[in-house]
Amino acid sequence: MEAAGTVRIVSRRMVRPSSGGGTPPSEVIHLTPWDLRLLTIDHIQKGILLPKPPVGGKRLVGALASSLERALDRYCHFAGRLAVEELGDGTVTVALRCTGEGAELVHASAPGLAVADLVGSMYTPSPVVWDLFSLNGVLDADAAIESLPVLSAQVTELADGVFVAVSMNHSVGDGTSFWEFFNAWSEIHRHQADVNVNGLNKMKMVSTPAPVLARWFVETSPVPIPLPFSKLQHVLRRFELPPVREGFFTFSAASVKKLKARANGEMAGVATAPISSLQALLAHLWRAVCRARRLAAGQETFYAVIIGCRGRVRGIPPGYVGNAVVPGRAVCAAGEVQEKGLGWTAWQLNRAVASFDEAALRAFLERWVREPTFAFTGDLSAVAAGGAGLETGSSPRFDVFGNDFGWGRPVGVRSGLGDKTDGKATVFEGPERGGSMSLEVCLAPAALERLVADHEFMDAVTLPARV
Protein backbone atom coordinates (compact mmCIF):
# COMPACT_ATOMS: atom_id res chain seq x y z
CA MET A 1 0.00 0.00 0.00
CA GLU A 2 1.28 3.47 -0.87
CA ALA A 3 1.78 5.97 1.93
CA ALA A 4 -0.60 8.93 2.00
CA GLY A 5 0.77 11.69 -0.17
CA THR A 6 3.06 9.41 -2.17
CA VAL A 7 3.36 10.41 -5.83
CA ARG A 8 4.06 7.44 -8.12
CA ILE A 9 5.20 7.84 -11.73
CA VAL A 10 3.01 5.67 -13.99
CA SER A 11 4.46 6.47 -17.41
CA ARG A 12 6.52 8.91 -19.45
CA ARG A 13 6.24 9.72 -23.12
CA MET A 14 7.60 12.25 -25.58
CA VAL A 15 4.85 14.20 -27.35
CA ARG A 16 5.70 15.66 -30.76
CA PRO A 17 3.80 18.22 -32.83
CA SER A 18 1.17 16.43 -34.91
CA SER A 19 1.84 18.48 -38.03
CA GLY A 20 5.15 20.21 -37.44
CA GLY A 21 3.37 23.54 -36.97
CA GLY A 22 4.53 24.76 -40.36
CA THR A 23 8.03 25.50 -39.07
CA PRO A 24 11.02 23.86 -40.80
CA PRO A 25 12.73 21.41 -38.42
CA SER A 26 16.05 23.10 -39.17
CA GLU A 27 14.96 26.54 -37.91
CA VAL A 28 17.30 27.98 -35.31
CA ILE A 29 16.17 30.59 -32.78
CA HIS A 30 19.09 32.59 -31.41
CA LEU A 31 18.71 33.74 -27.82
CA THR A 32 18.75 37.34 -26.60
CA PRO A 33 20.42 38.72 -23.45
CA TRP A 34 17.02 38.44 -21.74
CA ASP A 35 17.07 34.70 -22.53
CA LEU A 36 20.74 33.96 -21.98
CA ARG A 37 21.00 35.54 -18.53
CA LEU A 38 18.53 32.92 -17.26
CA LEU A 39 20.50 29.84 -18.34
CA THR A 40 21.80 29.58 -14.78
CA ILE A 41 18.51 29.25 -12.88
CA ASP A 42 15.74 26.69 -12.44
CA HIS A 43 12.80 26.13 -14.75
CA ILE A 44 9.47 27.94 -14.47
CA GLN A 45 7.26 25.45 -12.63
CA LYS A 46 3.57 26.21 -12.21
CA GLY A 47 0.58 23.92 -11.94
CA ILE A 48 -3.17 24.06 -11.50
CA LEU A 49 -5.43 21.93 -9.34
CA LEU A 50 -8.52 20.79 -11.21
CA PRO A 51 -11.70 18.94 -10.15
CA LYS A 52 -11.86 15.21 -10.76
CA PRO A 53 -12.29 14.61 -14.52
CA PRO A 54 -15.01 12.32 -15.90
CA VAL A 55 -12.39 9.84 -17.13
CA GLY A 56 -9.02 8.91 -15.71
CA GLY A 57 -6.02 6.72 -16.25
CA LYS A 58 -4.86 6.03 -19.80
CA ARG A 59 -7.95 7.66 -21.35
CA LEU A 60 -7.29 10.95 -19.57
CA VAL A 61 -3.59 11.00 -20.34
CA GLY A 62 -4.15 9.92 -23.95
CA ALA A 63 -6.59 12.80 -24.47
CA LEU A 64 -4.18 15.25 -22.85
CA ALA A 65 -1.36 13.96 -25.05
CA SER A 66 -3.54 14.56 -28.13
CA SER A 67 -4.31 18.16 -27.13
CA LEU A 68 -0.66 18.72 -26.21
CA GLU A 69 0.29 17.64 -29.74
CA ARG A 70 -2.01 20.33 -31.12
CA ALA A 71 -0.63 22.91 -28.71
CA LEU A 72 2.87 22.04 -29.90
CA ASP A 73 1.74 22.58 -33.50
CA ARG A 74 1.24 26.17 -32.41
CA TYR A 75 4.27 26.37 -30.10
CA CYS A 76 6.57 24.08 -32.10
CA HIS A 77 9.74 25.51 -30.53
CA PHE A 78 8.74 23.98 -27.18
CA ALA A 79 9.27 20.61 -28.88
CA GLY A 80 12.82 21.63 -29.78
CA ARG A 81 16.14 21.40 -27.99
CA LEU A 82 18.72 23.87 -26.77
CA ALA A 83 22.08 23.43 -28.48
CA VAL A 84 25.46 24.76 -27.45
CA GLU A 85 28.31 25.37 -29.90
CA GLU A 86 31.90 25.72 -28.69
CA LEU A 87 33.62 28.11 -31.07
CA GLY A 88 37.19 27.20 -30.15
CA ASP A 89 38.16 30.75 -29.22
CA GLY A 90 37.10 30.59 -25.57
CA THR A 91 33.46 31.39 -26.34
CA VAL A 92 30.24 29.45 -26.82
CA THR A 93 26.85 30.20 -28.32
CA VAL A 94 23.48 28.77 -27.29
CA ALA A 95 20.44 28.49 -29.56
CA LEU A 96 17.03 26.85 -29.58
CA ARG A 97 16.70 24.42 -32.48
CA CYS A 98 13.18 23.57 -33.65
CA THR A 99 13.92 19.87 -34.04
CA GLY A 100 10.44 18.53 -33.26
CA GLU A 101 11.91 15.99 -30.82
CA GLY A 102 9.04 16.63 -28.47
CA ALA A 103 7.93 17.79 -25.05
CA GLU A 104 7.72 15.33 -22.18
CA LEU A 105 4.40 14.20 -20.72
CA VAL A 106 4.52 12.40 -17.37
CA HIS A 107 1.56 10.51 -15.92
CA ALA A 108 1.60 10.15 -12.12
CA SER A 109 -0.77 8.89 -9.46
CA ALA A 110 -1.30 9.95 -5.84
CA PRO A 111 -4.52 8.26 -4.66
CA GLY A 112 -3.75 9.08 -1.03
CA LEU A 113 -3.59 12.82 -1.75
CA ALA A 114 -6.72 14.96 -1.72
CA VAL A 115 -7.43 18.46 -3.02
CA ALA A 116 -7.82 19.73 0.55
CA ASP A 117 -4.32 18.48 1.38
CA LEU A 118 -2.90 20.95 -1.15
CA VAL A 119 -5.09 24.04 -0.73
CA GLY A 120 -6.86 23.60 2.60
CA SER A 121 -4.26 25.48 4.63
CA MET A 122 -2.17 28.63 4.37
CA TYR A 123 0.88 26.42 4.85
CA THR A 124 1.91 24.58 1.67
CA PRO A 125 2.98 20.92 2.06
CA SER A 126 6.08 21.70 0.03
CA PRO A 127 7.75 18.28 -0.49
CA VAL A 128 4.44 16.79 -1.65
CA VAL A 129 3.70 19.68 -4.02
CA TRP A 130 7.22 19.57 -5.45
CA ASP A 131 6.70 15.90 -6.38
CA LEU A 132 3.85 17.00 -8.63
CA PHE A 133 6.40 18.56 -11.01
CA SER A 134 9.00 17.13 -13.36
CA LEU A 135 12.54 18.40 -14.04
CA ASN A 136 13.16 19.28 -10.39
CA GLY A 137 16.71 20.46 -9.79
CA VAL A 138 17.46 20.90 -13.50
CA LEU A 139 19.06 24.22 -14.42
CA ASP A 140 18.17 25.77 -17.76
CA ALA A 141 21.67 25.24 -19.21
CA ASP A 142 21.47 21.53 -18.32
CA ALA A 143 18.99 21.17 -21.18
CA ALA A 144 21.66 22.30 -23.66
CA ILE A 145 24.41 20.23 -22.10
CA GLU A 146 22.36 17.02 -21.80
CA SER A 147 19.86 17.53 -24.69
CA LEU A 148 16.82 17.53 -22.38
CA PRO A 149 13.32 18.69 -23.38
CA VAL A 150 12.68 22.38 -22.82
CA LEU A 151 9.10 21.67 -21.69
CA SER A 152 7.73 18.88 -19.53
CA ALA A 153 4.17 18.44 -18.26
CA GLN A 154 3.15 16.16 -15.39
CA VAL A 155 -0.43 15.06 -14.87
CA THR A 156 -1.04 13.63 -11.40
CA GLU A 157 -4.33 11.94 -10.56
CA LEU A 158 -5.39 12.60 -6.96
CA ALA A 159 -8.10 11.04 -4.83
CA ASP A 160 -10.63 13.71 -5.81
CA GLY A 161 -8.95 15.82 -8.46
CA VAL A 162 -6.04 16.15 -10.86
CA PHE A 163 -2.97 18.38 -10.81
CA VAL A 164 -1.64 19.55 -14.18
CA ALA A 165 1.88 20.96 -13.89
CA VAL A 166 4.21 22.40 -16.51
CA SER A 167 7.97 22.88 -16.18
CA MET A 168 9.38 25.19 -18.85
CA ASN A 169 13.00 26.10 -19.47
CA HIS A 170 13.18 29.77 -18.50
CA SER A 171 15.72 30.59 -21.21
CA VAL A 172 13.13 29.88 -23.93
CA GLY A 173 10.29 31.95 -22.48
CA ASP A 174 9.04 34.02 -19.57
CA GLY A 175 5.84 33.99 -17.55
CA THR A 176 3.83 35.55 -20.36
CA SER A 177 4.98 32.83 -22.76
CA PHE A 178 4.37 30.13 -20.13
CA TRP A 179 0.77 31.07 -19.37
CA GLU A 180 -0.14 31.75 -23.00
CA PHE A 181 1.02 28.21 -23.78
CA PHE A 182 -0.93 26.82 -20.79
CA ASN A 183 -4.02 28.81 -21.86
CA ALA A 184 -3.74 27.49 -25.43
CA TRP A 185 -3.32 23.87 -24.26
CA SER A 186 -6.36 24.01 -21.96
CA GLU A 187 -8.47 25.74 -24.63
CA ILE A 188 -7.48 23.20 -27.29
CA HIS A 189 -8.32 20.35 -24.92
CA ARG A 190 -11.68 21.90 -24.03
CA HIS A 191 -12.56 22.34 -27.71
CA GLN A 192 -11.30 18.81 -28.42
CA ALA A 193 -13.80 17.56 -25.85
CA ASP A 194 -16.54 19.54 -27.63
CA VAL A 195 -15.62 17.82 -30.89
CA ASN A 196 -15.80 14.40 -29.25
CA VAL A 197 -19.04 15.05 -27.34
CA ASN A 198 -21.00 17.28 -29.71
CA GLY A 199 -19.65 16.09 -33.04
CA LEU A 200 -18.43 19.51 -34.14
CA ASN A 201 -16.80 19.44 -37.56
CA LYS A 202 -13.74 21.47 -36.80
CA MET A 203 -11.70 22.84 -33.93
CA LYS A 204 -12.38 26.38 -32.81
CA MET A 205 -9.66 28.98 -33.13
CA VAL A 206 -7.41 29.45 -30.12
CA SER A 207 -7.93 32.87 -28.53
CA THR A 208 -4.36 33.45 -27.31
CA PRO A 209 -2.14 35.60 -29.57
CA ALA A 210 -0.39 33.76 -32.39
CA PRO A 211 3.13 33.04 -31.12
CA VAL A 212 5.99 35.06 -32.61
CA LEU A 213 9.12 32.90 -32.43
CA ALA A 214 11.66 35.32 -33.90
CA ARG A 215 13.69 37.02 -31.20
CA TRP A 216 14.07 40.79 -30.85
CA PHE A 217 17.62 42.19 -30.65
CA VAL A 218 18.91 45.74 -30.34
CA GLU A 219 20.44 46.90 -33.59
CA THR A 220 24.03 46.79 -32.30
CA SER A 221 23.85 43.22 -31.00
CA PRO A 222 25.75 40.36 -32.66
CA VAL A 223 23.57 37.37 -33.54
CA PRO A 224 24.26 34.85 -32.11
CA ILE A 225 25.74 36.37 -28.95
CA PRO A 226 29.04 34.71 -27.92
CA LEU A 227 29.39 33.93 -24.22
CA PRO A 228 32.90 34.24 -22.69
CA PHE A 229 33.27 30.60 -21.62
CA SER A 230 35.06 27.74 -23.30
CA LYS A 231 32.33 25.39 -22.03
CA LEU A 232 28.79 26.21 -20.96
CA GLN A 233 29.30 24.19 -17.77
CA HIS A 234 31.70 26.88 -16.54
CA VAL A 235 28.92 29.40 -15.99
CA LEU A 236 26.82 27.14 -13.76
CA ARG A 237 26.69 27.26 -9.97
CA ARG A 238 24.69 24.92 -7.79
CA PHE A 239 23.68 25.99 -4.32
CA GLU A 240 22.79 24.30 -1.05
CA LEU A 241 20.05 26.59 0.20
CA PRO A 242 18.73 26.74 3.78
CA PRO A 243 15.27 25.26 4.36
CA VAL A 244 12.23 27.42 3.81
CA ARG A 245 8.56 27.08 4.57
CA GLU A 246 5.89 28.22 2.14
CA GLY A 247 2.71 30.12 2.88
CA PHE A 248 -0.08 30.84 0.41
CA PHE A 249 -2.06 34.02 1.06
CA THR A 250 -5.08 35.21 -0.91
CA PHE A 251 -6.33 38.80 -0.94
CA SER A 252 -9.83 39.59 -2.17
CA ALA A 253 -10.41 42.30 -4.74
CA ALA A 254 -11.93 44.47 -2.01
CA SER A 255 -8.89 43.97 0.22
CA VAL A 256 -6.47 44.86 -2.58
CA LYS A 257 -8.55 47.90 -3.48
CA LYS A 258 -8.42 49.05 0.15
CA LEU A 259 -4.61 48.70 0.28
CA LYS A 260 -4.26 50.62 -2.97
CA ALA A 261 -6.52 53.44 -1.76
CA ARG A 262 -4.61 53.67 1.51
CA ALA A 263 -1.22 53.78 -0.24
CA ASN A 264 -2.30 56.46 -2.69
CA GLY A 265 -4.01 58.43 0.07
CA GLU A 266 -0.82 58.47 2.15
CA MET A 267 1.15 59.78 -0.85
CA ALA A 268 -1.39 62.34 -2.05
CA GLY A 269 0.43 65.48 -3.11
CA VAL A 270 3.80 63.69 -2.99
CA ALA A 271 3.68 60.92 -5.56
CA THR A 272 3.83 62.04 -9.18
CA ALA A 273 2.22 58.85 -10.51
CA PRO A 274 -0.47 56.55 -9.11
CA ILE A 275 0.57 53.53 -7.05
CA SER A 276 -0.73 50.30 -8.57
CA SER A 277 -2.66 47.56 -6.80
CA LEU A 278 0.30 45.19 -7.02
CA GLN A 279 2.74 47.78 -5.67
CA ALA A 280 0.45 48.41 -2.69
CA LEU A 281 0.12 44.68 -2.01
CA LEU A 282 3.87 44.04 -2.24
CA ALA A 283 4.52 46.99 0.06
CA HIS A 284 2.11 45.42 2.56
CA LEU A 285 4.11 42.19 2.35
CA TRP A 286 7.49 43.97 2.55
CA ARG A 287 6.56 45.77 5.76
CA ALA A 288 5.20 42.58 7.34
CA VAL A 289 8.25 40.52 6.38
CA CYS A 290 10.58 43.13 7.90
CA ARG A 291 8.63 42.68 11.14
CA ALA A 292 8.61 38.89 10.84
CA ARG A 293 12.38 38.84 10.33
CA ARG A 294 12.86 41.26 13.23
CA LEU A 295 15.19 43.44 11.20
CA ALA A 296 17.03 46.24 12.99
CA ALA A 297 15.88 49.73 12.01
CA GLY A 298 19.18 50.55 10.34
CA GLN A 299 19.49 47.30 8.40
CA GLU A 300 19.32 47.65 4.64
CA THR A 301 16.49 45.77 2.97
CA PHE A 302 15.59 45.45 -0.68
CA TYR A 303 12.69 44.29 -2.81
CA ALA A 304 13.58 42.95 -6.26
CA VAL A 305 10.71 42.96 -8.75
CA ILE A 306 10.63 41.46 -12.23
CA ILE A 307 9.68 44.17 -14.71
CA GLY A 308 7.98 43.29 -17.98
CA CYS A 309 9.39 44.94 -21.12
CA ARG A 310 6.39 44.32 -23.37
CA GLY A 311 4.85 47.73 -23.89
CA ARG A 312 8.04 49.45 -22.74
CA VAL A 313 10.15 48.66 -25.80
CA ARG A 314 8.94 49.36 -29.35
CA GLY A 315 9.27 46.44 -31.71
CA ILE A 316 8.18 43.65 -29.34
CA PRO A 317 4.99 42.29 -30.95
CA PRO A 318 1.96 40.68 -29.28
CA GLY A 319 2.60 36.96 -28.93
CA TYR A 320 6.37 37.42 -28.54
CA VAL A 321 7.46 34.12 -27.03
CA GLY A 322 10.96 34.89 -25.75
CA ASN A 323 11.88 36.48 -22.44
CA ALA A 324 11.16 40.19 -22.12
CA VAL A 325 11.78 40.88 -18.44
CA VAL A 326 14.46 42.59 -16.37
CA PRO A 327 15.06 42.78 -12.62
CA GLY A 328 14.47 46.05 -10.79
CA ARG A 329 15.23 46.78 -7.16
CA ALA A 330 14.05 49.14 -4.43
CA VAL A 331 16.46 49.59 -1.52
CA CYS A 332 15.96 51.32 1.83
CA ALA A 333 16.40 50.83 5.58
CA ALA A 334 14.05 48.48 7.43
CA GLY A 335 13.20 51.30 9.82
CA GLU A 336 12.03 53.46 6.92
CA VAL A 337 9.74 50.70 5.68
CA GLN A 338 8.10 50.55 9.12
CA GLU A 339 8.05 54.21 10.07
CA LYS A 340 7.18 55.90 6.77
CA GLY A 341 4.13 53.79 6.05
CA LEU A 342 2.51 51.71 3.34
CA GLY A 343 2.30 54.53 0.79
CA TRP A 344 5.97 55.50 1.05
CA THR A 345 7.05 51.86 0.79
CA ALA A 346 4.85 51.29 -2.26
CA TRP A 347 6.26 54.47 -3.80
CA GLN A 348 9.78 52.99 -3.62
CA LEU A 349 8.56 50.05 -5.70
CA ASN A 350 6.78 52.41 -8.08
CA ARG A 351 9.98 54.39 -8.66
CA ALA A 352 12.05 51.23 -9.20
CA VAL A 353 9.67 50.13 -11.96
CA ALA A 354 9.41 53.59 -13.52
CA SER A 355 13.20 53.88 -13.78
CA PHE A 356 13.17 51.29 -16.58
CA ASP A 357 12.13 53.23 -19.66
CA GLU A 358 12.99 52.22 -23.22
CA ALA A 359 16.36 54.00 -23.17
CA ALA A 360 17.38 52.24 -19.95
CA LEU A 361 16.27 48.85 -21.29
CA ARG A 362 18.18 49.30 -24.55
CA ALA A 363 21.26 50.35 -22.59
CA PHE A 364 20.92 47.23 -20.44
CA LEU A 365 20.83 44.98 -23.51
CA GLU A 366 23.79 46.69 -25.19
CA ARG A 367 25.86 46.52 -22.00
CA TRP A 368 24.99 42.86 -21.44
CA VAL A 369 26.56 41.82 -24.76
CA ARG A 370 29.86 43.40 -23.68
CA GLU A 371 29.67 42.37 -20.02
CA PRO A 372 27.28 39.44 -19.58
CA THR A 373 25.84 38.79 -16.14
CA PHE A 374 23.69 35.88 -15.07
CA ALA A 375 20.95 35.25 -12.52
CA PHE A 376 21.81 32.74 -9.79
CA THR A 377 19.39 31.19 -7.34
CA GLY A 378 21.84 31.77 -4.48
CA ASP A 379 21.88 35.50 -5.25
CA LEU A 380 18.09 35.63 -4.91
CA SER A 381 18.21 34.15 -1.42
CA ALA A 382 17.69 36.48 1.50
CA VAL A 383 20.72 34.80 3.08
CA ALA A 384 22.88 36.37 0.35
CA ALA A 385 21.40 39.73 1.31
CA GLY A 386 21.98 39.43 5.03
CA GLY A 387 18.52 37.97 5.57
CA ALA A 388 16.79 41.14 4.39
CA GLY A 389 15.78 40.67 0.74
CA LEU A 390 12.54 39.89 -1.06
CA GLU A 391 11.97 39.05 -4.72
CA THR A 392 8.72 38.75 -6.66
CA GLY A 393 8.12 37.31 -10.10
CA SER A 394 5.06 36.39 -12.15
CA SER A 395 2.04 38.67 -12.53
CA PRO A 396 -1.58 38.85 -11.36
CA ARG A 397 -2.47 39.56 -14.99
CA PHE A 398 -1.64 36.02 -16.10
CA ASP A 399 -4.76 33.98 -16.78
CA VAL A 400 -4.52 31.13 -14.28
CA PHE A 401 -8.13 30.37 -13.40
CA GLY A 402 -9.34 30.44 -17.00
CA ASN A 403 -7.49 27.17 -17.67
CA ASP A 404 -10.56 24.96 -17.98
CA PHE A 405 -9.64 21.70 -19.73
CA GLY A 406 -13.30 20.84 -20.16
CA TRP A 407 -14.42 19.54 -16.78
CA GLY A 408 -14.29 22.64 -14.60
CA ARG A 409 -12.13 25.64 -13.72
CA PRO A 410 -9.08 25.33 -11.47
CA VAL A 411 -9.61 25.35 -7.72
CA GLY A 412 -6.02 26.31 -6.94
CA VAL A 413 -2.54 27.05 -8.25
CA ARG A 414 0.86 26.16 -6.84
CA SER A 415 4.48 26.33 -8.02
CA GLY A 416 7.27 23.78 -7.93
CA LEU A 417 10.69 23.52 -6.35
CA GLY A 418 12.41 25.88 -8.79
CA ASP A 419 14.19 28.86 -7.17
CA LYS A 420 12.47 28.35 -3.81
CA THR A 421 14.65 30.58 -1.66
CA ASP A 422 14.15 32.59 1.52
CA GLY A 423 12.44 35.78 0.37
CA LYS A 424 10.83 34.49 -2.83
CA ALA A 425 7.23 35.66 -3.24
CA THR A 426 5.29 34.62 -6.35
CA VAL A 427 2.13 36.52 -7.28
CA PHE A 428 -0.91 34.98 -8.99
CA GLU A 429 -4.35 36.19 -9.91
CA GLY A 430 -6.74 35.29 -7.11
CA PRO A 431 -9.37 32.56 -7.47
CA GLU A 432 -12.24 35.08 -7.56
CA ARG A 433 -10.38 36.97 -10.34
CA GLY A 434 -11.57 40.54 -10.92
CA GLY A 435 -8.66 42.12 -9.05
CA SER A 436 -8.07 39.51 -6.36
CA MET A 437 -4.48 38.31 -5.92
CA SER A 438 -2.55 35.54 -4.18
CA LEU A 439 1.01 35.50 -2.87
CA GLU A 440 3.05 32.33 -2.44
CA VAL A 441 5.70 33.33 0.10
CA CYS A 442 8.89 31.43 1.00
CA LEU A 443 10.58 32.36 4.28
CA ALA A 444 12.69 30.80 6.99
CA PRO A 445 10.25 28.68 9.06
CA ALA A 446 10.30 30.88 12.17
CA ALA A 447 9.80 34.04 10.11
CA LEU A 448 6.82 32.54 8.27
CA GLU A 449 5.19 31.59 11.57
CA ARG A 450 5.57 35.18 12.76
CA LEU A 451 4.13 36.45 9.46
CA VAL A 452 1.02 34.28 9.90
CA ALA A 453 0.69 35.62 13.47
CA ASP A 454 1.01 39.25 12.32
CA HIS A 455 -2.48 40.73 12.74
CA GLU A 456 -1.81 43.77 10.56
CA PHE A 457 -0.74 41.56 7.66
CA MET A 458 -3.41 38.91 8.14
CA ASP A 459 -6.26 41.43 8.40
CA ALA A 460 -6.02 41.77 4.62
CA VAL A 461 -5.88 38.00 3.96
CA THR A 462 -8.80 35.77 3.04
CA LEU A 463 -8.56 32.49 4.95
CA PRO A 464 -8.62 29.28 2.87
CA ALA A 465 -12.11 28.04 2.13
CA ARG A 466 -13.14 24.51 2.99
CA VAL A 467 -12.65 22.35 -0.09
Image (spheres, rainbow, N blue to C red):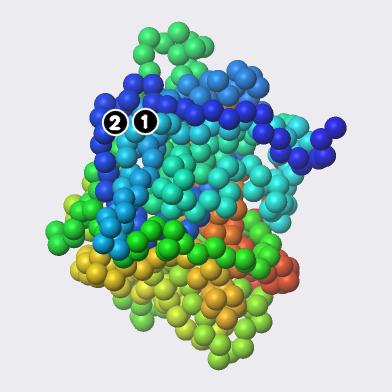
The residue carrying mark 1 is: 100
The residue carrying mark 2 is: 25
Q: Quadrant of the C terminus?
A: top right
Q: For this view, does 23 lie left or right of residue 109?
A: left
Q: Quadrant of the N terminus?
A: top right
Mark pair 1, 2: CA separation: 6 Å
Residue 333 pos. (x, y %): 51, 86
Q: Residue furthest bottom?
A: 298
Q: Residue furthest left?
A: 219
Considering only order in the chain, which callout, 2 or 1, is on the residue closer to the N terminus?
Answer: 2
Q: Is residue 53 above or below residue 218?
A: above
Residue type, numbered disc 1: Gly
Q: Residue at x 46, y 34 (%)?
A: 103
Helix, strand or loop at label 2? It is loop
Residue type, numbered disc 2: Pro
Residues at badges 1 and 2 in contact (C-beta under 8 Å)? yes
In front: 303, or 101?
101
Q: Residue at x 69, y 62 (%)?
A: 245
Residue 85 pos. (x, y %): 31, 50
Q: For this view, does 4 lie left or right of residue 275?
A: right
